[in-house]
Image (cartoon, rainbow, N blue to C red):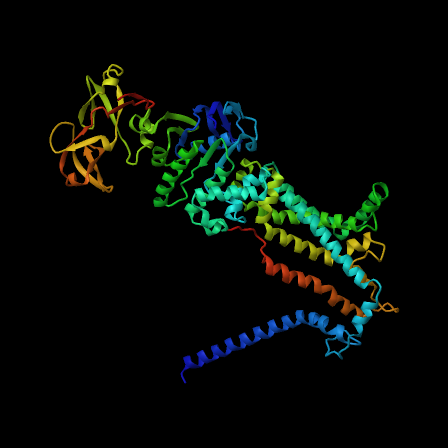
Amino acid sequence: MTVSDDDDARRAAWRMAARIGFYALTCLIAVFFALPLLWLVTAPFDASPTYAVDVPDPTLQNFAEINANPYAWGSMLNSILLSLGTALFVVVGAALAAYALSRVRMPGRDALLYVLLLLSSVVTGTAAMVPLFLLVSEIGDTVHPALGIDSSFAVMLVMAGGLLPAGIFMLKDFVDTVPRSYEESARVFGASPLRILKDIVAPLIAPGLATIAVWTVVNVWGNFLVPFILLRDPEKQPAAVLMRTLYTESGQPNLALLSTFSLLYSLPVIAMYLYVSRKYGFRFHGGIKS
Amino acid sequence: MAGISARGLDKVYPGGVHAVDHLDLDIDDGEFFALLGPSGCGKTTLLRTIAGLEQATGGKVMIGGRDVTQVSPARRDVAMVFQDYALFPHMTVIDNISYPLRIKRQSRSSRHARATEIGVQLGLAELMERRPGALSGGQQQRVALARAVACHPSLFLFDEPLSNLDARLRLEARTFLKRLQRELGVTTVFVTHDQAEALALADRIAVMEAGRIRQLGTPREVFGRPANTFVANFIGSTPMNLLDGQVRGETVAVAGGVLPIPAEAAGQVAEGEKVTVGVRPEYVRLSMTGDGLAGEVSILEHLGTTTLVTVDCDGELVGATVPEEDEPEPGASVRLAPVPGRLLLYRAEGGELIGA
């Protein structure tokens, strides 16, 4: 065996070792992220789950208990209503605003968009909690109770307000890709701007509209803070808020119910993802084949 | 049916670009009218101002005697065909054609009947259920035309209607377009940068440069008697010979020889004045002997049935087209004489026509 053969063999061994190390590390990382999900799938079927992932002692007792909870299904329905309602506001509002912003020339347009985007991350955040509560309760007292505390409508408006700027920002990209000649052609035929938006622009940016609708639903679905502050009546609270009540008398989280409810809570969102992704495919940048 | 008049029409863009510069224009009822010019000359802006898609910054536009300067595009009773056809990709051909009628709130059955009727006329019967994406360029163009026809306007506006078609299809579409316009008899204005297209289609042509009309006339006038060197240069598939010359008595000295001054121009030029002599290669006779400019054949370009011969006459390059069988040898000494009555004389300063 020559010296160079020896060198080659050593180098090959090193390479092999490095590769094994790399795979071991990525596996470890994968396990780190997979474990909680695994727990979420197994714990609901376990009579007495712990924080450890365990082979469950199969039972459906937990589901029966959730079913018996007077607010469980109602809260799920509330979540669906809140997210769909907010999605409607965001999609309609963002479509109108994005179309206008994409087509009307005005000074400082981009600056306006960026400022809106910046502010929106503040509006629904923790920092705005107190002012939001005061604002909504004041409006409810003086204007109409439907806009005040304990109104799902008010929650939708507040959350739509927080999501709209980013939605407009995303949607404007889509509208920008629609050739102007389409609209000019419709204008010459006598179509009004709203008509053009409805007949021509909206169908062409459908993937964009679907994207922000899904994005809104997911955001509202997972939002705890806003409905928690603005809704007092447990009949109106969404699933994210109900989860807070699944504790034992001693103040310990009831892992059995919590995991069961969490699993049920995640199913509609997963179903929606699968549906929309099959129907439209996800694209975060517009692009229309002509 | 309607004619168009523009009076002192101005369009200045916010950046200060003067796209249409105090323009006067009259287009007759039923006329097929071409706006011709290089890119950036304002022809498309003028068309869009007539359509109402651009707001004139000064002057007036009248359609059928009605002042429409402040009227929205929808109320001008015009139909426009765009360069990219602007067919709605999410609608079928029949929906595309009937879209103008849908806006006019016609019932679904009546607008589909009308769209089908027009589609059949324009040879689209087989394609009515397809989407634009599944059509060839020529078919898309016909759908765009059908859509314009469907709304029964008093005025058609075409923005470069043929430029997105390949060369062969363009000739077919050209014939089709001219026949369609003849049959419908609707006043039509179209924009093009292709002089051959304008010459072939139009009843009259306006040649534009920098927002102004440099010449307005029939294809024959514009081709045979360009009013200035700009138009002379722009019109014609082989470039016109424009040679610097100087007046010497009854003749003009040019390219190492002399040519007679055209009768019309005699008396309008001073002895020794600098002029530009223009003559199309098609109107130059090439011979081995005889009179005219003497020179040496330098380049031959085959144009099919004819050949463009470039002759070096004392340093100036002069083009002449000859039938393919009369092609001279490269390097041969030849004589070039303009066909009588086809020689044009322009002022060296400003390039305006003196006479022919």
In the rendering, at what x and y percent does residue A227 appear? 79, 54
In the rendering, at what x and y percent does residue B157 appear? 46, 34
The one of A71 and B219 positioned closer to us in this rendering: B219
**Residue depicted at x 49% and y 40%:** B147
Q: Residue furthest left?
A: B289
Q: Looking at the image, is B349 positioned above or below residue A113? A: above
In the rendering, at what x and y percent does residue B41 appear? 42, 31
Q: Do we see residue B276 in this rendering?
A: yes
Q: Looking at the image, is A256 positioned above or below residue B347? A: below
- B294 sits to left or right of A128: left
Q: Quadrant where the C terminus of chain B lies?
A: top left
Quadrant assignment, res B33: top left
Q: Residue furthest bottom?
A: A1
Q: How many marks?
A: 0
Q: Looking at the image, is B225 positioned above or below residue A64? A: above
- A236 sits to left or right of B285: right
The one of B112 and A278 positioned closer to us in this rendering: B112
The one of A246 and B45 positioned closer to us in this rendering: B45
Q: Residue furthest right?
A: A249
Q: Do we see residue A255 in this rendering?
A: no
**Residue depicted at x 74% and y 66%:** A264
Q: Looking at the image, is A152 positioned above or below residue A193? A: below
In the rendering, at what x and y percent does residue B204 appear? 37, 28
The one of B302 and B182 positioned closer to us in this rendering: B182
